[in-house]
Image (cartoon, coloured by chain):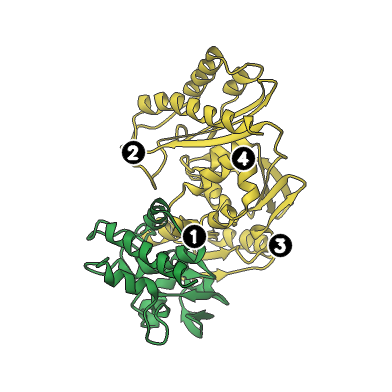
Chain colours: A yellow, B green
Amino acid sequence: MSEVKFISPETLEQAVDAYYKSSKEGKTKILAGGTDLLVQIRSGISQPDTIIDIKNIKELKEISNDNGSYTIGAAVAGAVLDEEEDFGNNWPGVLEALRLIGSEQIQGRASLGGNLCNASPAGDSVPALIASGATVKVHGPEGERNMPIESFHAGPGKTNLKNGEIVVNFQFPKKQKCSGDAYLRMIPRTEMDIAVVGCAVNVTIENDKCVDARVALGAVAPTALLVEDASKALIGSNFEKEAVEKAALACEAACNPIDDKRGTISYRKKVSKVLFKRALEKAIERAKKG
Amino acid sequence: MAKIQVKTKINGEETEFLCQPYDTVLDVLRKDLNMTGTKEVCSTGDCGACSITMDGRLVCSCLVLAAETEDKNIETIEGMAKNGKFNVLQKTFLEHAALQCGICTPGMLVAAKSLLEKNTNPTETEIRYWLAGNLCRCTGYDKIVKAVQAAAEEIRENA
């Protein structure tokens, strides 16, 4: 093994500079919670010659609430976010999606940023982030930019980050009155498994009418999807049976899944409809509570 | 190869060690510091046998690089008994026969202690969820859960 470097910069600029330079020379990995990366290193899938630990950078560990608009650092661990009571009241769907990942030990380390950058099509927090309408701030050699979560991924294990770009934080919109989000996933076991289908729904209700809706699916395509046709079917409706059915069919149509030991293509498509309806019900229930 | 020098606190004691970039905390604990109470089983974060706390957070030491622990506060099973006296959980695990082969036990104890520090009155469901990342292939968990409940009760009584 050639010389492996471990660096833990304290500023974003230092991290981006090191990342940009080292990834030109060899294989560099960013280390957040390490719950994916260390497993990949151990199994030989990933053998980086530079590891950049970004957890000493302030912005990546910060949680802030600006008049109802949350900013969550990319490396904030699930167990830490869980203690931020008001975040869970605002975005219960995002929190439940993040908290579904692994055991309490994993939650001590696993982060939204890590889940996003690992770019698994089945990453649980990704559909919930998409449905919430959050954007992700990235910092690179050319400065900062914001990306909608739904355009972050290029394929399984691949992101649209440019060379040297690091995910900094997630910016959530101010939660609308009478809105609610929810995330559900289907797994073959009861806990701690990889989603066969994941579905997140975020709805806003005014006078019993759906005035806004975002529906996202995970594990049914090369990347998590924003299902715009499902949103269209819901917006303006009273969630009557026909509208919900139309939105469910839009979910099914959006699926482009793989066939594997966890679920066949037809199973995943069918489950996407069922899961969407259940997640919608939960989101509506939360929206009605305010 | 140049090793990384790390200064950290383990069970309250300032500790210095040298490690390679790929070394995990588990590697260093067991191989370099001869602290073999923390067990290595799956090495991929699935079984919880290597549970420790770092700055008060429950983590798998197989999923933490040793180089990350600079200036951290690490607690392992070796720090659980104080002045030759068992922690209440160690006592109730014995009283309830909550172990057989013993390999999962250090991880169970560290994880259970971390739960009881957060919540001294957990429901059975909360205990089972909290310990879901600690796999035991011998006892079937019932005795473990009962031992944690008994320890929680004792902590509440003595509070």
Relative side of A153 to B138, left or right: right
Q: Secondary structure at mark 1?
A: loop
Observer-nearest residue: A259 or A102? Answer: A102
Per the image, the residue denoted by label 4 is A149
Give residue B149's position: percent from left, percent from top: 37, 61
In this view, the residue in front, A59 or B21, is A59
Instruction: Give the residue pinned by disc 1.
Output: A34
Which comes before the other along the chain, label 3 or label 2? 3
Q: CA distance from mark 4 to mark 3?
A: 23 Å
Three-letter amino acid code at the position of disc 3: Glu
Tell me the residue that label 3 is attached to: A13
Is the same chain shared between marks 1 and 3? yes
Residue at screen point 64% across, 48% down: A87
Which label's residue is closer to the chain start, 2 or 1? 1
Q: Which residue type does callout 2 highlight?
A: Pro
Question: Share a chain, discs 3 and 2?
Answer: yes
Q: Chain of mark 4?
A: A
Q: Residues within 10 Å of mark 3 (few under 14, many from 20)?
A: some
Read off the residue under disc 2. A188
The amino acid type, in three-letter code, at marker 4 is Ile
Asked if badge 2 and badge 1 are on a common chain, one would say yes
Whether B54 is drawn above or below A217: the answer is below
Q: Amino acid at mark 1?
A: Gly
Task: Name the N-terminal-most of marks 4 and 2.
Answer: 4
Q: Position of residue B105 (x, y in %)?
A: 31, 68
> Which secondary structure, mark 2?
loop
